[in-house]
Amino acid sequence: MAWTPRTAEILRAVAAYQLAQEALAGEFSARWAEALAAVEAREVAGSLTELETAYAAAVRESAAASYALSIAFYRLVRALETGRVIGGPGYRPGASLGSLWADFNKATGKRTGSGPYTPLPVDTRNPFPAEDLKREAERVAETFRREVADRVAKYERERAGRGSAALDDAELIAREKEFLESLKTGGSGAGGMLVQDGGRDMIHNALQDDPGAIGYYRATDASPCYFCALMAGRGAVYKSKRTAAFGAHPHCHCQAVPIFSRRYQLPAENTQFARMWKRFGGGSLADWRTYYSMTTKT
Ligand SMILES: [Zn+2]
């Protein structure tokens, strides 16, 4: 008998997944802010090694959680859409909609759904790539250099350049505050991207290796930027030999949602962005940006 995709449940899982990924980025940002709060502006240069260690550890911990969460999500959506379980990390014999919901609920820390404990047929394949810790460490180092170390070097150069021509207290305090704020915002936006990529890239790659997957779409956060709204409005991206990169950016909480059946349904937001694009009537990306910001303001 043909399986009927459990659309309402899938959309609930998608919403819970997006929020859980966003929360992981938020946890990372909080840890980074805490590490920064422990040093004075003038001490940052001397504490770069410690800060980088803290930064890398915080990314790793949250990215690992994102990876595990995303596998639970992928397996759940696949089962809800096709009635079949896929193997790989976290797979347990006798898996059912009940056990997959339980795994997902545990990963998100919220009870979003439940299901019957009737074992489902299994596809034993493991499409999930292992975590690429080396690549992640390289990206973390690169990100830290760009968002933190380079800013610190510039700040120190300016400080040395001023020499004894001291700023008055108010100016100095304002400048220090601005400097620390830039480390916090820059570091957390780019680091939060690495955190969510732990799961996001994994899903994007798993699709390619799963004959049951036909593509993905973009699930946005509550207030996506014009670029992400445009991508989400385009709907499904069917996979091909060269499926383009997902294209996340710092401070972006969009997620890749795998699709396993032509009978998938997009979240209401995606349909809304598609309508908005239609009303816009086409034009340059810059024009769309203006149109989008005017339409979404208020
Ligand atoms: Zn986005």
Image: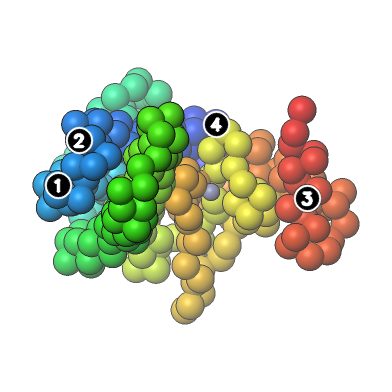
Circle 4 residues within 10 Å: few <14, some 14–19, many ≥20? few
Judge whether 56 appears above or below 173 on screen: below
Q: What is the three-letter code of the residue carrying label 2?
A: Val
Locate residue 129 relative to residue 246 in the image: left or right. Answer: left
Locate residue 189 relative to residue 298 in the image: left or right. Answer: left
Which SS class for mark 3?
A: helix
* Residue extending farthest front: 164
**Residue annotated with mark 1:** 47
Verify CB contact (< 8 Å) between mark 3 and mark 2: no
Which SS class for mark 2?
A: loop
Q: Give the image location of residue 67, x and y in percent.
A: 26, 48
Q: What is the three-letter code of the residue carrying label 3?
A: Thr
Which SS class for mark 1?
A: helix
Find the distance from the CA under tag 2 to the CA under tag 1: 8 Å
Q: Nearer the viewer, mark 1 or mark 3?
A: 1
Which is more toward the observer, 133 or 3? 133
**Residue annotated with mark 4:** 8
Queried on whether the Cβ of the residue with tag 3 lies below 8 angstroms from ligand 1, the answer reads no
**Residue annotated with mark 2:** 39
